[in-house]
C-alpha cells in the first residue's frame, strides 16, 4: 500500500527548510562527486537571500529533489539542482525548475545565471528547455580520471 502510494502520489514543489538538511545532503551525495554536508545545507538555507525548493512525492515523505538559488538584487544564481537517481528522466527536474523560477520571478528576479559541466547532457537539455544560453566557459572544478579539468559552461536566461 505504501509503495503504491509512493509510485502514484502527485509531485509537488514546496519551499525547503532546515528540517530537510540531512535528506538534502543524502540526495546531493547521490548526485555529485563532492558532496555537501547537512551543515552546508543548513548554512545556505538560513541565508536570507537563498531560496530552496524541494520536490515532494507525498505529504509526509522526504524531498526527492532540490533546487537552491542565491538572489542578489534582480539577479539570481542557481547554486545546485538534483533529482534522486531512481526518479530521473520522468520530467521531475522540469517541474521543479519551473516552480523554482516562478519563486525567483516573484522575488523580482529578472536574470538567472548558472554553471554546468559541458558533458552533463541531462542538465544542458533541462536548461535549454528554460531558455538558458551559453555566455562563457571556464575550467570547471571537476576533473576526469586522467586528471584533465572538466570545462564548465556559464549560462544565463532572462525571466
Ligand atoms: C540534471 C537532472 C537534475 C535532470 O533531472 P531529471 O528529472 O532527470 O530531468 P527531466 O526528466 O525533467 O528532463 C529534463 C530534460 O533533460 C533531458 N534528459 C534527462 N535525462 C537525460 C539524459 N540522461 N541525457 C540527455 N538528456 C536527458 C530530458 O529529455 C529533458 O529534456 P526535454 O525537456 O528537452 O525533453 C538530473 O539528471 C540530476 O539530478 N543529475 C545529477 C545532478 C546534476 O548534474 N545537476 C545539474 C548540475 S548543473
Image (cartoon, rainbow, N blue to C red):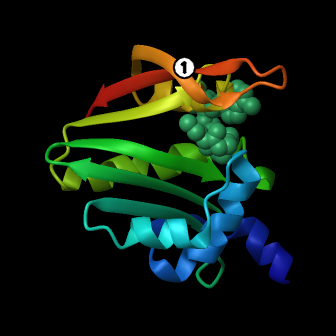
| Residue at 64% across, 66% down | 25
Rendered view: 18 above or below 64: below
Rendered view: 89 above or below 2: above
Q: Which residue is mark 1?
A: 139
Assign the N terminus to one quadrant of the image: bottom right
| Relative depth, front residue between 85 and 47 | 47
Residue 132 coordinates in the image, percent (x, y): 40, 25
How many labels, in total? 1
> Could one spot residue 15 in this view of the protein?
no
Residue 110 coordinates in the image, percent (x, y): 19, 38
Assign ligand 1 to one image quadrant: top right
Res 89 quadrant in image = top right
Q: Is residue 117 left or right of residue 157?
A: right
| Relative depth, front residue between 39 and 52 | 39
Residue 69 coordinates in the image, percent (x, y): 38, 51
Q: Secondary structure at mark 1?
A: strand
Amino acid at each position: 500500500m505504501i509503495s503504491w502510494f509512493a509510485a502514484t502520489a502527485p509531485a509537488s514543489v514546496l519551499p525547503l527548510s532546515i528540517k530537510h538538511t540531512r535528506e538534502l545532503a543524502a540526495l546531493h551525495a547521490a548526485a555529485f562527486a563532492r558532496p555537501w554536508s547537512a551543515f552546508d545545507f543548513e548554512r545556505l538555507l538560513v541565508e536570507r537571500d537563498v531560496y530552496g525548493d524541494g520536490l515532494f512525492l507525498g505529504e509526509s515523505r522526504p524531498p526527492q529533489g532540490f533546487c537552491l538559488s542565491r538572489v542578489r538584487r534582480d539577479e539570481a544564481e542557481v547554486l545546485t539542482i538534483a533529482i534522486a537517481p531512481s526518479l530521473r528522466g520522468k520530467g521531475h527536474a522540469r517541474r521543479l525548475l519551473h516552480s523554482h523560477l516562478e519563486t525567483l520571478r516573484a522575488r523580482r528576479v529578472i536574470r538567472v545565471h548558472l554553471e554546468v559541466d559541458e558533458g552533463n547532457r541531462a542538465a544542458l537539455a533541462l536548461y535549454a528547455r528554460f531558455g538558458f544560453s551559453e555566455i562563457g566557459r571556464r575550467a570547471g572544478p571537476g576533473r576526469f580520471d586522467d586528471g584533465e579539468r572538466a570545462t564548465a559552461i556559464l549560462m544565463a536566461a532572462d525571466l
